[in-house]
Image: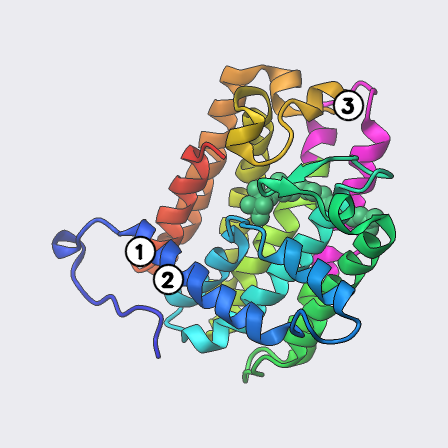
């Protein structure tokens, strides 16, 4: 089944119904994740309960949505985009479980629920994160190979985005920067790795699952990079403007941990401007799709305006 068929002329096109897209993409991703993961009863049950606890705790599923939206822009099929979409969500959830550990950010709440280690203990939470990371590669290995993009390439993409040069590098720089004076350039380095790399990977994998052209892949990379940066600027803004209840995680943590953020370096107003400029650059990257990337456009706007 194709994700969406859009062949109307721009003037005749109705405003894109993002709510419907997010509801259906989240449902499809949740069903697929449920089928990929061992059941709660599979022995050892504790680890599978812990993995599922965080995975189904109510995340926004933005990375899978970006993956499916990119596939749609390239004329792909939902069934082909779902495995990479699920793989990136497993990586993302693992990073949150580990990020919340006492040795890292030491948080009690995530996705509106107690953090994994608060429910299952630190040992199981470390293992649940490890198992989700490994699960991502198993799911990627089960996805379809394409003439332009082999399994090897899909797996390489995920490994690079989540490895010691990207996601982990960003987290290391974030940890080491706590309490230190940080420049905007250093902050950009952290955001590129800690956040943008995985969002960009999600978009690229969606394109690859549709056997996209090299030019489309380049456009998706440019889009994902800028949306990823904007995502973290907004995350920093929300940390100081929203309540813990709204966010489903502890608000105000960046200030408390003396973390470098856009609001702390350039102020709230300039941070909002930067997020809008980054989103404009993301929009510009979609020109190549000639109006046929409605899902990606709507998601970029939604991510800029989100309040949680
Ligand atoms: C290996 C010990 C060890 C830890 C790794 C890599 C890592 C820990 C943590 C990643 C750092 C991190 C949490 C980056 C921030 C990215 C971000 C803004 C996450 C929040 O994403 P949302 O808002 O969350 O999409 P939901 O819950 O909605 O999915």
Q: CA distance from mark 2 to mark 3?
A: 38 Å
Q: Tell me the tag on residue 24.
A: 2
Image quadrant holding the N terminus, namely bottom left
Q: Is residue 179 magenta?
A: yes
Does residue 241 appear left or right of residue 180 in this picture?
left
Mark earlier in primary sequence (3, 1) = 1
**Based on the displayed image, in which of its 4 quarters is residue 118 positioned?**
top right
Percent x, y of residue 274: 51, 27
Q: Secondary structure at mark 1?
A: helix
In the displayed structure, would residue 102 be above or below residue 16? above
Crowding around mark 1 (Cα neighbors within 10 Å: few <14, some 14 to 19, many 20+) is few
Seen at 87% across and 53% down, the residue is 123
Residue 110, percent across and down?
64, 41
Q: Which residue is mark 3?
A: 257
To which residue does mark 1 refer? Answer: 20
Q: What residue appears at the point 32 percent right and 50 percent down from the top-left corner? A: 19
Residue 294 lies in quadrant: bottom left
Q: Which residues are magenta?
A: 160-188
Give the CA distance from mark 1 to mark 2. 6 Å
Residue 35 screen position, x and y as percent:
56, 75
Q: Are marks 3 and 1 in contact (CB under 8 Å)?
A: no
């Amino acid at each position: 089944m194709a994700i969406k068929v859009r062949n109307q002329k721009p003037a005749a096109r109705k405003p894109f119904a993002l709510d419907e897209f997010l509801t259906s993409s989240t449902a499809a991703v949740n069903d697929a994740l449920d089928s990929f993961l061992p059941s709660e009863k599979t022995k050892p049950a504790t680890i599978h309960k812990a993995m599922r606890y965080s995975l189904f705790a109510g995340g926004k599923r933005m990375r899978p949505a970006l993956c499916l939206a990119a596939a749609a822009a390239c004329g792909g099929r939902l069934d082909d985009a779902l495995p990479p979409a699920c793989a990136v969500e497993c990586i993302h959830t693992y990073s949150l479980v580990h990020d919340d550990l006492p040795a890292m950010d030491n948080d009690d709440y995530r996705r509106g629920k107690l953090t994994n280690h608060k429910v299952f203990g630190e040992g199981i939470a470390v293992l649940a994160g490890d198992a989700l990371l490994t699960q991502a590669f198993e799911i990627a290995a089960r996805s379809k190979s394409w003439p332009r993009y082999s399994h090897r390439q899909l797996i390489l993409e995920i490994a690079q985005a989540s490895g010691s040069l990207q996601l982990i590098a960003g987290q290391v720089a974030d940890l080491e920067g706590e309490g230190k004076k940080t420049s905007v350039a250093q902050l950009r380095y952290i955001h590129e790795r800690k956040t943008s790399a995985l969002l960009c990977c999600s978009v690229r994998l969606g394109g690859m699952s549709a056997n996209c052209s090299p030019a489309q892949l380049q456009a998706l990379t440019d889009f994902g990079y800028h949306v990823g940066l904007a995502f973290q600027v907004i995350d920093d803004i929300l940390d100081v403007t929203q309540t813990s209840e709204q966010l489903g995680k502890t608000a105000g943590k960046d200030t408390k941990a003396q973390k470098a953020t856009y609001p702390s370096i350039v102020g709230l107003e300039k941070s909002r401007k930067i997020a809008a400029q980054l989103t404009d650059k993301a929009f510009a990257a979609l020109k190549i799709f000639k109006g046929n990337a409605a899902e990606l456009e709507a998601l970029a706007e939604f991510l800029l305006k989100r309040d949680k």
